[in-house]
Amino acid sequence: MPKIVILPHAELCPEGKIIEAQSGVSICDAALENGVEIEHACEKSCACTTCHVIVREGFDSLEEPDELEEDLLDKAWGLEPDSRLSCQALVTDQDLVVEIPKYTINQVSEAH
């Protein structure tokens, strides 16, 4: 089963976390199922950028983003070449290293 290494994030996962995920599950769902409360203001419907992550390792194992995801990523805070919306990036058979950016474009967190 592939592993997702979530790098430390001051608020969501201060110690970082290593989780196992089934192939075909989104990075967002895998994180949420393992206690990493990544924001997902649109309820994972590919309508916002709050679940934006940077895939530091394993990016090439993911399917290409569709045009809608690419358009939304253009609005994400801290966009990098290896950025994805975690609700759209499905785990394959390769391990991933994921960084959750410090900020989102939301002025107020959905969790508060």
Image (cartoon, rainbow, N blue to C red):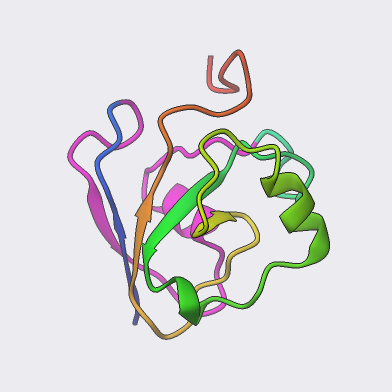
Q: Main secondary structure of the magenta part?
A: loop
Give whichever of 18, 67 is nearer the camera. Answer: 67
The residue located at (50%, 50%) in the rendering is 80
> x, y percentage for residue 3?
31, 71
Indicate whether residue 28 is drawn in magenta. Answer: yes
Indicate whether residue 61 is drawn in magenta. Answer: no
Residue 37 sits above or below residue 6 on the image: above
The residue located at (65%, 74%) in the rendering is 64
107 sits to left or right of 91: right
Query: The magenta stretch spans which residues?
Result: 11-40
33 sits to left or right of 57: right
Give the residue at the far bottom of this rendering: 93
80 sits to left or right of 18: right
> x, y percentage for residue 8?
24, 41
> x, y percentage for residue 20?
32, 69
Residue 98 sits above or below residue 60 on the image: above
Quadrant of the drawing holding the N terminus? bottom left
Give the residue at the far front of this rendering: 81
The residue located at (56%, 64%) in the rendering is 26
